[in-house]
Amino acid sequence: MKKRYDIIVCGAGIAGITAAVKASRPGASTLIIEQYHFVGGMSTAGLVSPFMKHSVNDIPLVRGIFEEIELEMIRTGGMINNGFNSASFRLAAYKLLKESGCDILFDSTIVDTDFKNRSLTSVTVITPVGLSEFEGNIFIDTTGDARLVFLAGLPFNKGDEKSGLLQALTLFFRMGGINMETVAAEVKKNPADFLPWVIDELGKTGIVSVAGFLSHVEKARKAGLLSKEIEYIFFTTLPETGEGSFNTTNILELDGSDSEQLTKAEFISRIQTDEVVNLLISEVPGFENAFLIETAPQVGVRETRRVIGDYIVTGEDIKTGAKFQDVIARGCYGIDIHGQKDESSRMEDLPEGLFYEIPLRALIVKEADNLLSAGKCISSTREGQSALRIMPTSAATGEACGALAALAVKSGKQIREIDHSDVQKELEGNI
């Protein structure tokens, strides 16, 4: 492990993975730092599956390295349609990172930075054997909570612009032994008991989503057997027959960037998981022989801090399908805010065929000369972030950061001196 790199990527979620791979392939010495012992972020530590909508008229808006990950998971049998297994994702990501030539540092938490005169010169990480400092020319913050920006003392935004509220937290969990034919029959028999998210091809080989079981939820809540925060049960099937990934727990009034509050969230979410599993097995047709396989290693955090970039992507940009000359990524996922206590949730799909673009300027941290950011903490308003935070879009913005950083290293120029057209040439398929 060297002590100095051309490019240092902080955070090995999907945005960090694509950034590191893209930066390493042209030959820039690259280090990716991750607090866990594995890569993937919410794809693995959060068990988040499936990938959310990223196609317009059946044409993918995100390809590039993201598609390479998809194809590798398909090759190993770990992905069907847009649903995948976390173990398959880890293997695919490891393969791309190893082949790219970048260095990887696990079990390392960033605790300090050296930032002065608009330039970040190094990061300090704590490992089981002590502190280590790594110097770099360009840094990419893909931590998900803008931790690098925060530690550098740079300004950031957080939560709703007026209320300060943050989206609800969710712990994903996985169950097996589900009889999907019985579930399908239940949906057809009692359609009013389910939300419109149900996919028609229930019980067949594709990925299926089911949301509702409303009467069961109401009965359990009234009996005190289910937390009042849980309004419905939602799961999607996984590649293995009879398995489902549940996006159901609902943790309110807690801040995912605060360790004490995250600890509280872990306890609440696991209690909710136990309640939901017991309800399904004891009351719901199709779950008589079901069982809990695993819970995610960590609670899923939808939003905390957001960097302030040269451009801030807004909700209006999302809703109107904004286009930019310096486009580096595209998306079609609408505003999706999981409301806090006393706040209504919002799920606003875009009309079919409409998509928006993300400008290069949104990746560049405004008050720094060598710092980029992508993924969940990208420069955006709360509404903008609620659409951009999904994994395919995060992968595209991460890849763009890697491309820009590599071009700057190769040319010896500052990141703002690189023409956007040169970056665009490196991102065919994503723009």
Image: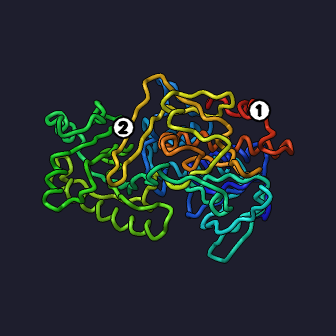
Query: Could you tell whether 251 is left or right of 155 in the image?
Result: left
Residue at the (49%, 45%) spot, across then down = 382
Residue 21 horizontal/vertical position (percent): 67, 46
| Element on which disc 1 rests | helix
- The residue indicated by pointer 1 is 422
Three-letter amino acid code at the position of disc 2: Ile
Answer with the quarter of the image where residue 411 lies.
top right
* Cα–Cα span, label 2 and label 1: 38 Å
Residue 402 horizontal/vertical position (percent): 70, 44
255 in relation to 81, above or below: below
Q: Nearer the viewer, residue 277 or 350?
A: 350
Q: Quadrant of the C terminus?
A: top right
Mark 2 touches mark 1? (CB < 8 Å): no
Answer with the quarter of the image where residue 417 lies.
top right
Residue 53 horizontal/vertical position (percent): 45, 34
| Element on which disc 2 rests | loop
Q: Residue furthest front?
A: 162
Residue 387 horizontal/vertical position (percent): 48, 40
Residue at the (74%, 52%) spot, across then down = 368
For residue 355, the mark is none
Residue at the (38%, 60%) spot, across then down = 253
Q: Quadrant of the N terminus?
A: bottom right
Label located before the other in sequence (2 or 1)? 2
For residue 207, the mark is 2
Q: Residues within 10 Å of mark 2 (few under 14, many from 20)?
A: many
Q: Nearer the viewer, residue 85 or 408?
A: 408
Q: Residues within 10 Å of mark 1 (few under 14, many from 20)?
A: few
Q: Please state which of the two labelled residues, at mark 2 or mark 1, is closer to the viewer.
A: 1
